[in-house]
Image (tube, helix red, strand yellow):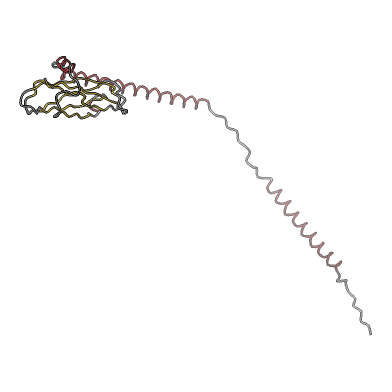
Amino acid sequence: MDRKYVGAPAGPLGGRRRTLGALALLLAGLGVVVACSSSGGSSSSSPGPSSFSPNPSAFSSGASALGSLASSAKASVSSAAASLSAAASSFAASVSAQAGENRAGAQSALATVTGSGNVTSGITITGLPKATTGGLNAALVTIVNNTSGTANYAIRVNFSDASGTVVDSTVVNRQNVAAGATATVTAFSTQSPDQALVPTVAQAQSY
């Protein structure tokens, strides 16, 4: 005897229908959620672009402040330069007064000297810090009289730049230095105060 089964078809067509129905229900649910989200979000306002209007007076104030600072800086520099110039003049005047004794005689003594002079020892030279010279290049010349009698000294000091070029030259002198005694004299240059010049003894003559 043949047996027959009665029921809904379980083939491919039935499965597709069930799947399409499920998708339709899912899409319907999503539509409701999206609609609710849109209506709820519409109540809040999104921030829009804000405009910025600069205040011209702020720039004017800044420019004025910068101008005042520049003027103040210039005044400070001018004041410092004037103070330095006064200090240099004072130093030069003081040294010139001390070394002025028989300066003409010292220059005359060196005028006929060839080479480095007749003093071969006992002369040393040391640069002085500009803080003590008003910004001028200066040096302290130390003389030790190694002879057996009193002597006068005429000394030529050269001031050279970093390349070795002689920028300035000056003559200093010391009178009546006793035998075995030590004396000092200051040499300075008013040339190129903005450079560090090197002082050297070019000539030394006793007379």
Q: Identify the residue shown where x is 18% and y is 19%.
A: 113
Percent coordinates x, y for residue 120 in the rendering: 15, 28
Residue furthest to the bottom in view is: 1
Foreground of the two, 38 or 129: 129
Q: Which residue appears at 32% of the width and 28% of the height?
A: 163
Residue reaching furthest to the right: 1
Most distant residue in the left direction: 148
Residue 149 image point, x, y percent? 5, 24
Q: Quadrant of the C terminus?
A: top left
Instruction: Report whether 147 appears left or right of 22.
Output: left
The residue at the point 40 percent across, 24 percent down is 70
- Total labels: the figure holds 0
Q: Is residue 60 left or right of residue 80?
A: right
Snapshot quadrant of residue 145: top left
Q: Is residue 145 left or right of residue 77?
A: left
Quarter of the image for residue 84 reads top left
Q: Which of the 4 image quadrants contains residue 191?
A: top left
Q: Residue furthest front?
A: 114
| Residue in view at x 72 percent, y 54 percent | 33
The residue lying toward the viewer, choosing from 178 and 16, is 178
Screen quadrant of the N terminus: bottom right
